[in-house]
Image (cartoon, rainbow, N blue to C red):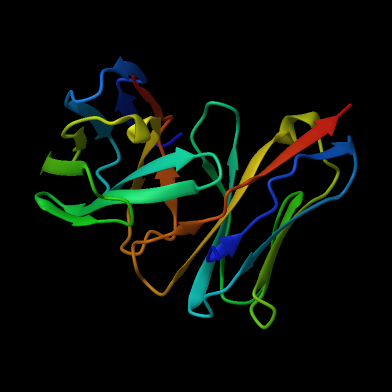
Amino acid sequence: DAGITQSPRHKVTETGTPVTLRCHQTENHRYMYWYRQDPGHGLRLIHYSYGVKDTDKGEVSDGYSVSRSKTEDFLLTLESATSSQTSVYFCAISETQGGNTIYFGEGSWLTVV
Amino acid sequence: QKEVEQDPGPLSVPEGAIVSLNCTYSNSAFQYFMWYRQYSRKGPELLMYTYSSGNKEDGRFTAQVDKSSKYISLFIRDSQPSDSATYLCAMKPGSTDKLIFGTGTRLQVFP
């Protein structure tokens, strides 16, 4: 298994509160990604990073921000959680640009009530 | 219309059957094609990765790409109950960072 640890694995939070999900990797891969997975939509890219302090938006980035201060850590923050952000969040890593081989973490289940 | 279409299933087959899983796509720029397997409440696991057209075989799994028809397939031979999972196709053009996923097909293999 790729060395990816997501935390927390499960969280219930209230609408309007900020939430931070953490992804930690031990593979020293340069590229890191945050996806969300919802029924009927599949996996959708939120944000990705191609190096320390280098990030870019994916297709569903509104309401989310990211930070990467170290190679091994990629944080996803929901600035003010809404019920539409209830989802499963997956972190992924890739050694190469373009991500031909992307490896996923185990997921973080977030419920916004 | 979604860029990648995948039948959600479920597809239910007896142990030992040959399984065919498929995706269609609309973007002719897609060049890299992947299949992921996802067990319940787990992260997706990369099964196969193919560049451009043609076939690729790995054990009981064969990935097939037909770019002229914009159609990809994953075949599983001698299916096992442990193959029961959701199978996701994914694809992207060139060397971009943005994989586009299908919604997944749920496969059930019964003994």
B43 vs B4, nearest the viewer: B4
Pinpoint residue A69: horizontal percent, then vertical percent. Answer: 8, 41
Q: Quadrant of the C terminus of chain B?
A: top right
Q: Quadrant of the N terminus of chain B?
A: bottom right
Q: Residue at x 74, y 39 (%)?
A: B107
Residue A107: quadrant of the picture: top left
Pinpoint residue A88: horizontal percent, then vertical percent. Answer: 42, 32
Pinpoint residue B25: horizontal percent, then vertical percent. Answer: 59, 69
Pinpoint residue B49: horizontal percent, then vertical percent. Answer: 56, 60
A103 vs B21, nearest the viewer: B21
Q: Residue at x 33, y 17 (%)?
A: A11
B36 vs A1, nearest the viewer: B36
Q: Residue at x 71, y 62 (%)?
A: B73
Residue A113 shown left or right of residue B60 in the figure: left
Asked whether residue A70 is in view, the answer is no
Looking at the image, the residue that sits furthest to the bottom is B68
Residue B102 shown left or right of residue A9 in the figure: right
Residue A16: quadrant of the picture: top left
Residue B79: quadrant of the picture: top right
Label count reads 0
Work out whether A64 lies above or below A57: above
Q: Residue at x 82, y 34 (%)?
A: B109
Asked whether residue B54 is in view, the answer is yes
Residue B29 shown left or right of residue A17 in the figure: right
